[in-house]
Image (spheres, helix red, strand yellow):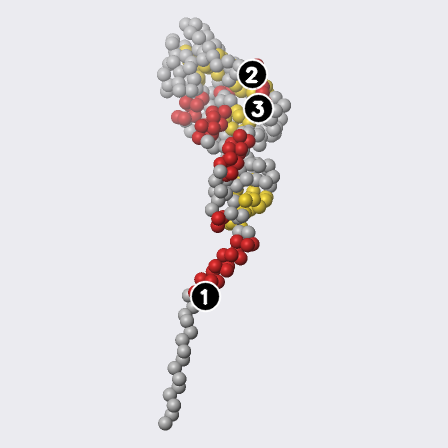
Amino acid sequence: MASPVGCEHYARSCLLKAPCCGKLYVCRLCHDAEENHQMDRFKVREVQCSACQTVQQAQKTCQQCHVQFGEYYCDICHLFDKDKKQYHCQPCGICRIGPREKYFHCEKCNLCLAQDLRGNHKCVENVSRQNCPVCMEDIHTSRIGAHVLPCGHLLHKTCFDDMVRTGAYRCPLCMHSAWNMEDHWDQIDIEIAQSPMPTEYQGATVKIICNDCQAHCAVPFHVLGIKCSGCGSYNTAQEGGLIQPPQQQQSEQDTENEAETDTEPEQQDQPESPTAH
């Protein structure tokens, strides 16, 4: 059981009495980690004050010693915590970290999103009813902010920040670029222009599929990147091996034929048959 000042998850001065087993825990997460079942926080009716140990109805302040159980308290979620500008979203059914004015609830996505995404995101019905593809933890019930990728897939804001730090720029689900990569593609263009391929690879092409526009095309091959001819993205995947230009293929075939000719043994004069006497 956690200390009276809270736990690693929440800062609070009370213990929740689990409606399922009657045991006292600082929070549902601590309960679920210890027990073989989960606590329904919405059914919590009683708490125990960490200061005077009085068991009482769930409320913000102890009825006995008047200790405040949490700076923030939601009487629907029975959430006690320090003030993080939380608010309870009725359509989501849970508390979110605010402030409220910076977020709106998208009815189709069924999720609270940052105001700058209002009318500026790809709606996916009930997108939050899935696990984050990075940490594999539930998105909808998490109080961690969500980030919507251009493809419409969703992940935790903290997981997106980790992707940016490590240089991973593709959506873990569909491989679409996770943000605008035009500046990076321009830089690759410059590097390729300054780094011509060796003679034997000049004119070689390769078939690709573009992860951004889904185009299938044959494009010039370069070790620094393979550019989609449709949208200009370098977020591509190679399909098959290199395709050499016809003249290059013929040149290689002639070289092989010459090599075979050079290795044939020279024909020697045959000895005359002995004359019968």
Dot 2: element? helix
Q: Determine the CA span between mark 1 and mark 3.
A: 73 Å
Could you say which is closer to the camera, residue 164 or residue 258? Answer: 258
Q: Is residue 196 visible?
A: yes
- Disc 3 crowd, CA 10 A, few/some/many (<14, 14-19, 20+): many
The mark nearer the N terminus, 2 or 1, is 2
The residue beneath circle 1 is 261
Q: Is residue 142 visible?
A: no
Q: Residue at x 53, y 14 (%)?
A: 99
Q: Residue at x 57, y 22 (%)?
A: 113
Task: Confirm or deny contact between disc 2 and disc 1 (CB under 8 A).
Answer: no
Could you say which is closer to the camera, residue 17 or residue 97? Answer: 97
Residue type (three-letter) at the residue carrying disc 1 = Thr
Q: Residue at x 48, y 62 (%)?
A: 257
Rendering coords of residue 103 (x, y %)? 57, 18
Drawn side of residue 257 relative to residue 112, left or right: left
Q: Nearer the viewer, mark 1 or mark 3?
A: 1
Dot 1: element? helix
Please identify the residue farthest to the top as the structure is shown. 65
Task: Confirm or deny contact between disc 1 and disc 3 (CB under 8 A).
Answer: no
Rendering coords of residue 87 (x, y %)? 53, 15
Could you say which is closer to the camera, residue 138 or residue 65? Answer: 138
Rendering coords of residue 209 (x, y %)? 56, 42
The residue beneath circle 3 is 111
The mark nearer the N terminus, 2 or 3, is 2
The residue beneath circle 2 is 102
State the image quarter where residue 261 is shown: bottom left
Q: Nearer the viewer, mark 2 or mark 1?
A: 1
Q: Determine the CA span between mark 2 and mark 1.
A: 78 Å
Drawn side of residue 199 relative to residue 104, left or right: left
The mark nearer the N terminus, 1 or 3, is 3
